[in-house]
Image (tube, helix red, strand yellow):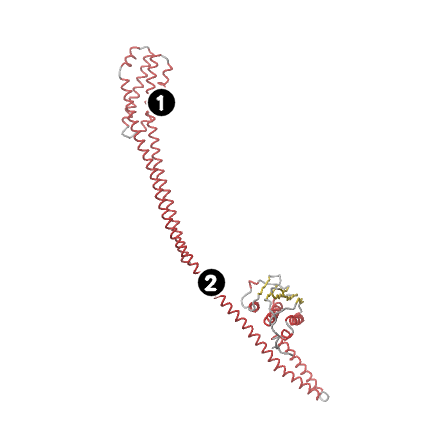
Amino acid sequence: MSALLDRLGRRRGLALAAAAVAALAVLAVNEIAFQLADRALDNVQARHNARNEGLKLRELLTDAETAQRGYLLTGRDDYLAPLQLATRELPAVLQRLRSQYASSEWEALVAEASRRTDEKLSELQLVVSEYRDGSTTAWRVLMESDIGREKMQAVREAVEQLDRHELAQIVIERNAVYRSLLLGRLGVLGLTLLALGGLIVFLRRNEALLTERRLHAIELRLERDRLDAEVAHRTADLTELARHLQTVREDERAHLARELHDELGALLTAAKLDVARVRRTTRNGMPELDERLQHMSGLIDQGIALKRRIIEDLRPSALANLGLTPALEIFLREFAQRSGLQLTQELSEVRTDDAGRLALYRLVQEALTNVLRHAGATQVRVALGESDAGLQLSVRDNGRGFDPGGVPPGHHGLLGMRYRIESLGGQLELHSAPGAGTLVLARLPARQDEAPGPSDAPAD
């Protein structure tokens, strides 16, 4: 599974890297196309500016010549406004043209056109000046000569050459813009197709990996199911083993109780009878011996009581002879006398088999022993009842409580109670918290009592 995840991670990393490279390539192609188009557009704009300057030069010079002739015909000064405008603006126009074509093959033509423009403008201003001074012959001679026409024709031809050149350059730059746009379009298209191809390959490989992952998940699920079945089988075996060990333990206790009852009971009873017989013969004549025999008889009674208590601990006779509820009442009464705890009983008659009665009785024994040893409680409540769901036994104390999840290893009492109850198909719950006391709650499924038979518990 880790190898598959590593492969998926590497594939994702390669896909991300490829996507990043594709994105950078698209950005690079777009940026290159943009820079080329922007440069071409700047050149187109510069060509248009140069063309406009040439056309403006011709327009200003033509308007100035027309203004001169109108002034000569009418003698009105308002006709000289275009000439004055040309006088003011033509130097700047010529300067921009010289800057535009500096260090180029057209620099000489611009210089010639600039010289011709200056001469034509001077010729126009001179004619106007002669006209104002009243030198009719002088200005007529200048007007009738071809000098002005030649200069104007030279300027027109220069402007036309520059205009044709700029138009040709504008076409070239426009084609460059189209090429840049086509380059960007083809680049984006190619990279898009490449990205689509890479995406298709990635999706196919990813689908193969996902298929392999699904197969691996199916294998893992089958293996998990197998392990779950194995765990369930082992758990059932352990539960059965725990039940068997509990049964063997109780059988050994019952056997030991019978042996103690039969053998030790017979010995103690015979000893007590012998002591009583000897006391009858020595009571009058030997008072000191009678006192010792009386003391011995008391010791035998204590041994009989000890024997009875041990037998009851090993196999309670009241449980087999009287049932669960009376046995618990007897045990709780004796436990309260020995421990000094305040015990509250809520016990009802229940129906269960021998294994269930013994399990619940041992649960109460273990729970009260834990209360006495560890809880530091003053009050204990024991409740036993029956419902449609089965039997329910609870032991609650007001002790110091503890954290059930923090019980260290080695405490087998709670684990033993849990296995004993679960081996009978029941459930054991433990609720506790520091300072909040402890509740031990056991539930067993309802069962009918077994058919009555001879009891294996010893009778006193």
Residue 302 location, quadrant? bottom right
Label for residue 225?
Answer: 2
Q: Is residue 354 above or below residue 137?
A: below
Real-space Cα distance between discs 2 and 1? 97 Å
User: Tag 2's secondary structure?
Assistant: helix
Q: In the image, 250: left or right of 194?
A: right
What is the number of the mark on residue 350? none
Locate residue 432: give its quadrant.
Answer: bottom right
Tell me if I can see residue 229 in this picture.
yes
Q: Is residue 192 above or below residue 247?
A: above
Q: Tell me, yes or no, if residue 412 can be seen here.
A: no
- Residue 30, given in percent of the width and then of the height, sits at 36, 40
> What is the crowding at mark 1: few (fewer than 14 residues within 10 Å), some, or many (at least 20)?
few
Query: Do the residues under discs 2 and 1 have CB atoms within 8 angstroms?
Result: no
Q: Quadrant of the N terminus?
A: bottom left
Instruction: Give the amino acid at mark 2.
Output: Asp
* Disc 1 element: helix
Q: Which residue is mark 1?
A: 89
Going by the numbered disc 1, the residue's amino acid type is: Glu
The picture places residue 93, in percent across and down from the top left corner, at 34, 24
Mark 2 or mark 1, earlier in chain: 1
The residue located at (54%, 71%) in the rendering is 243
Tell me: 290 left or right of 19: right
